[in-house]
Amino acid sequence: MKKLLALLLALMMVLSLGACGSKDTQEPAADDSTAETGDTAENTDAAAGDDAAAGETGDADASDLQYIKDKGTLVVGMTNFAPMDYKEEGSDEWIGFDADMAKKFAESLGVEVQFQEITWDYKIMELDNKSIDCVWNGMTLTDDVTSAMSTSEPYCLNAQVLVTKADKAADFEGLTSLEGYTVAVESGSAGEAAAQALGAATVPVQAQSNALMEVAAGTSDAAVIDLLMAGAMVGEGTSYADLTYSLNLNEAQGLESEEYGVGFRKGSDVTEAFNTFWAEQVANGTVLEVATTYGLQESVILE
């Protein structure tokens, strides 16, 4: 009996020592794991901090000009607006004063030009989303435009004119208000603002060319469009021979003269590159040559 009791006591001591030994072995392992986890967390945080710092530096140093050069294209946002941007019948090529000069600007940057038709109302959104790289389409430098974009130096003078059917022109002579008339306008354009300021019931359409179609079809009494387009598309020998416009409209009805500019993303360094390019093209006679091709020699700014 004594021998059995002694054997049981010995066995309990062995088990007890084994348990203690197991605990002592595991505790340092747990400490090592905690240390490794801590190191990993610190390293991850440091890496994240480095990435964030790199991102901030990248944003600060971002060059819109380099972005365009890297992708190899200058995407020009525009609408069908003769004589600035348009296609001749049967052709897929965009031509016009703005289109021709855009091709030359892209060439000076070492990239291809790509023309993208846009809805004029959404030009700022298209620019900010990088769907396009600039707005170059006889764009009036309004306060809204200059506050939302980085804009070039003015390159062309323009005015808003009232287009009517030739046999109805006498009805509009001497008017100082357009109340009671329906007037087709390009949505979001300077013409829309001018027509609304004169009390017209405006009919917004996608492009100025559509505004002329409204008048020709008799679905609108008149249209307010750019003088440059009216000169190219209205009157004898044009697509709208039965329409006419008044050069005296600005004084008689208070429609102000305006300036055209090219719009780039806010803070874009492409604006400076454009202004340098344009000054060179004025100096070497290219701007006047291209302007003369499209009948704009009296409107283009050469100083």
Image: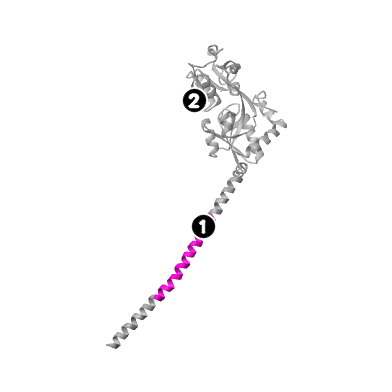
Nearer to the camera, 139 or 42: 42
In x, y percent, where is residue 33? Answer: 46, 66
In the image, residue 115 sits, relative to residue 258, either above or below, namely below
In the image, residue 168 sits, relative to residue 14, either above or below, namely above
What SS does tag 2 mark? strand
Q: Which residues are magenta?
A: 20-47
Q: Is residue 281 left or right of residue 82?
A: right
Nearer to the camera, 281 or 260: 260
- Residue at image point 56% right, 49% down: 55
Q: Is residue 33 visible?
A: yes
Q: What amino acid does circle 1 point to?
A: Thr
The overriding secondary structure of the stretch rendered in magenta is: helix
Magenta stretch encompasses residue 4: no
* Residue 252, image quadrant: top right
Which is nearer the N-term, disc 2 or disc 1?
A: 1
Q: How is the image coloured?
A: one colour
- Residue at image point 58% right, 46% down: 59
In the image, residue 47 sits, relative to residue 7, either above or below, namely above
- Residue at image point 52% right, 36% down: 125
Mark 1, residue position: 44
Magenta stretch encompasses residue 35: yes
Neighbourhood count class around disc 1 (C-alpha, 10 Å): few under 14, some 14–19, many 20 upward: few
Nearer to the camera, 24 or 206: 24
Quarter of the figure with the N terminus:
bottom left
Q: Is residue 131 visible?
A: no
Nearer to the camera, 190 or 29: 29
Looking at this view, name the residue that lies furthest to the right: 284
Mark 2, residue position: 204
Q: What amino acid does circle 2 point to?
A: Pro
* Residue 150, image quadrant: top right
